[in-house]
Image: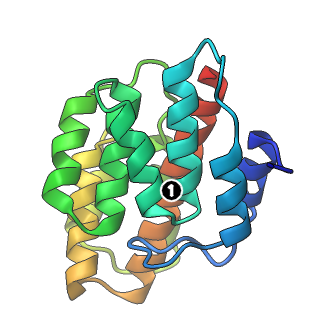
């Protein structure tokens, strides 16, 4: 039986330290994972959003397999396809992630994290950090580009990045996931 509400779970993830890895290998909090699994979605009139919420909460908890199982149930919906894409990016299956991001298209009404991304990059540059041109170009985009962000993660995970870049990408991923989970929660 779940003892935390979805809103309380989201707040736990907002306070999470250290930041979530780009490609997690173990579940972050096993008890919380069980609580997420026990959330009831029976009778919810917004079933797709409710299933997406469980996919997203599991993903925020680094529970890739459980997240994947829920995302697959709603992959025909743009929100489900987007969560499916994030899950594949986080497991390191980048071509599959890009496929699902293309399937998702634009999420109407989502306040994506691009403004925060721009501020984070500007702040990092202002403190004297050297950043790759691909990240600076990404920060100059008008809208969030999940495909381009996936390319940045690929660069970092294959060893082309620095510790500073890794932390910045983790921060960007955090903004993406928290804004997306809030969007999903509000849709339920």
Q: Is residue 83 left or right of residue 44?
A: left
Quarter of the figure with the C terminus: top right
Question: Within the image, what quadrant is residue 83 found in?
Answer: top left
Helix, strand or loop status at disc 1: helix
Residue 108 x, y percent position in the rendering: 42, 18
Indicate the position of residue 118 as horizontal and vertical percent values: 45, 51
Which coloring applies here? rainbow
User: Is 64 situated left or right of 158 in this image?
Assistant: right
Residue 151 showing in the rendered view:
yes
Where residue 10 appears, x then y in whole percent? 71, 49
50 or 21: nearer the eye? Answer: 50
Q: Depth check: 54 or 40 in front?
A: 40
Quick check: 113 left or right of 133? right
Q: Residue at x 43, y 79 (%)?
A: 25
Other residues around mark 1 within 10 Å, as few (<14) / some (14–19) / many (≥20):
many
Q: Is residue 125 visible?
A: no
Q: Relative to the observer, which residue lies in front, 54 or 125?
A: 54
Is 69 above or below relative to 59?
A: above
Query: Taking 164 as reference, is 174 above or below it?
Result: above
Q: Which residue is mark 1?
A: 59
Residue 12, placed above or below residue 19: above
In the image, what residue occupies the spot 20% across and 31% down?
Answer: 103
Q: Residue furthest top?
A: 45
Quadrant for residue 130, please give it.
bottom left
Identify the residue at horizontal 63%, vertical 50% (top origin): 37
The image position of residue 106, as x and y in percent, is 31, 25
Count of numbered badges drawn on the protein:
1
């Amino acid at each position: 039986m779940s003892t935390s509400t979805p809103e309380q779970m989201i707040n736990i993830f907002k306070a999470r330290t250290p930041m979530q890895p780009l490609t997690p290998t173990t579940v972050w909090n096993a008890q919380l994972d069980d609580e997420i699994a026990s959330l009831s979605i029976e009778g919810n009139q917004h079933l797709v959003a409710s299933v997406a919420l469980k996919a997203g909460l599991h993903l925020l908890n680094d529970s890739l397999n459980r997240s994947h199982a829920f995302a697959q149930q709603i992959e025909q919906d743009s929100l489900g396809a987007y969560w499916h894409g994030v899950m594949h990016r986080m497991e390191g299956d980048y071509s599959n992630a890009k496929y699902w991001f293309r399937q998702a298209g634009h999420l109407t009404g989502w306040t994506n994290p691009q403004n925060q991304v721009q501020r984070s990059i500007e702040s990092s540059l202002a403190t004297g950090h050297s950043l790759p041109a691909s990240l600076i170009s990404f920060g100059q985009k008008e809208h969030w580009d999940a495909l381009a962000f996936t390319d940045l993660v690929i660069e970092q995970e294959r060893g082309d990045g620095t510790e500073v870049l890794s932390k910045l990408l983790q921060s960007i991923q955090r903004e993406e996931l928290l804004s997306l989970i809030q969007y999903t929660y509000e849709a339920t």
